[in-house]
Image (cartoon, rainbow, N blue to C red):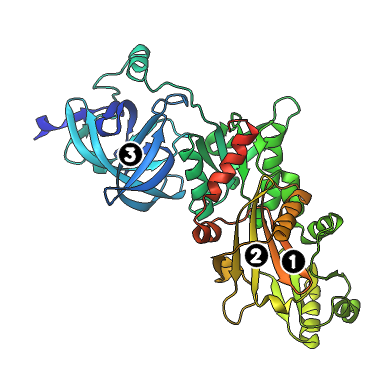
Amino acid sequence: MLQNKVILGSEEWCSFPELGIPTIKARVDSGAKTSAMHAINIAPFIKNDANWVKFDINPIQNNIKTIIHCEAPLVDKRIVKSSSGFREHRYVIQTSLKIGDAKWPIEMTLTNRDSMGFRMLLGREAMSGRVLVDPEEKYLLGQPTTEALKELYQNSEKASSGLRIGLLASNPELYSNKRIMEAGEMRGHEMHFLNIKECYMKLDAKTPEIHYRGGKILNQFDAIIPRIRPSITFYGCALTRQFEALKVFVLNSATAITQSRDKLYSLQLLLNSGIDIPTTGFANSPLDTDNLIKMVGGSPLIVKLLEGTQGKGVVLAETKKAAESVINAFKSLNANILVQEFIKEANGKDIRCFVIDGKVVAAIQREAMPGEFRANIHLGGTASVIKVTAEEKKIAIKAAKAMDLKVAGVDIIRSSKGPLLLEVNSSPGLEGIEGATNKDVAGEMIKAIEKNFKLI
């Protein structure tokens, strides 16, 4: 049986005919269970009623110009733990491996291996029963010359006509982030997901840099889309400022994001622009609680934590006694709070206008669950299509401009006094608004970047 097995060294060149990859260098690693291939712009899709996945690969290490566009049947999606302990959700495909004169089907995961020394890792599951490994040898089946590689990839070595766009965020599995990546890829751009916590920077007057996991320098991006969680606003905005220092176009600036996260300051900016809001109070002394409640029209009223997001840290106090208890409880924790008049006639509904580049591209009405006053989708609220008035559109556009946001989710409430602005969000979610309106909001975000580079 030994004569039927392929003998490999610790490094070999192989090919994947079904993927259109003529040759790729692989690390042969019997210590790894699963095989893995470098892939970017990974996106699942349906083909002939079956699950498939498309992806791009730079098959030659340190060469981002050579790109192969691939697609393969999707077998599974599983959590893979790296040797360093990093856990990652990966798509699993099945395709044919050709190595030497032998060819057989294997399963492998797709992941970004930019920080690794090899574009391909051949694990023991793919080799079992077919391969013997001599770890002291390399390239027992041959090694292509530089000229041969250029010949093999001559039709693939093309500079992308699109832009190189980074999505600066925390969770690649989040609907909004997946849709933005997908929208960019569909419009021909090279999309990269940049995990905020895996970025670090070099502050230098002459050569400022941003580094990524594995020491890769992020210095060739055309544009960055910041999608920063409130809990990491400080660090996310520091990275965004660093990209700005590198003259990279950012879809929302660090300054705009920072001021939008400060509820009190943002309301002051909006009022200075002549935008009406519900009567709001702010204080830092429990002694003024009674007058603070009177100032906003008495109970019922809303009490908000300045640091709250997605409806968290927002309380409806229906009586004066309840309002006093909530305000004093928050103040005893040294929490910064706002108190705001309760617009009863809104009946648990508000309007979310999605503003991109000075235009309302989509709008929905959000309605709270029964017994709830907060209409946030994350809290179980429902979304439906609504036709906003010219005045509401004007308020939304004016609010985004006042906050200097190119992308904003503007929340408006309908009151007996007319439309009032509630809040401006610098990283608005896409799931509720795209699902309800069936509009390609993520695509509109990519178009805003293209417009800056005069591509449209």
Image quadrant in which the N terminus is located: top left
Q: Is residue 374 left or right of residue 265?
A: left
Q: Which residue is mark 2?
A: 351
Image quadrant in which the C terminus is located: top right
For the residues bearing labels 2 and 1, Cβ distance under 8 angstroms: yes
For the residues bearing labels 2 and 3, Cβ distance under 8 angstroms: no
Q: Which residue is mark 3?
A: 71
Q: Which residue is mark 1?
A: 419
Question: Of discs 3 and 1, which sits in the foreground?
Answer: 1
Between disc 2 and disc 3, whose residue precedes?
Answer: 3
Depth order, front residue of 189/216: 189
Q: In x, y percent, where is residue 327?
A: 79, 77
Q: Secondary structure at mark 1?
A: strand
Question: Of discs 2 and 3, which sits in the foreground?
Answer: 2
Is 93 rendered above or below residue 243? below
Q: Residue at x 79, y 83 (%)?
A: 299
Depth order, front residue of 333/239: 239
| Amino acid residing under circle 2 | Ile
Q: Is residue 448 left or right of residue 178?
A: right
Mark 3 vs mark 1, CA separation in Å = 49 Å
Mark 2 vs mark 1, CA separation in Å = 10 Å
Between disc 2 and disc 1, whose residue precedes?
Answer: 2
| Amino acid residing under circle 3 | Glu
Instruction: Examine the rendering and report whether any part of residue 242 can be seen.
Output: yes
Mark 2 vs mark 3, CA separation in Å = 40 Å
- Considering every residue shown, the one lying at the far front of the view is 390
Q: Secondary structure at mark 2?
A: strand
Q: In x, y percent, where is residue 14?
A: 28, 28
Q: In x, y percent, where is residue 123?
A: 30, 40
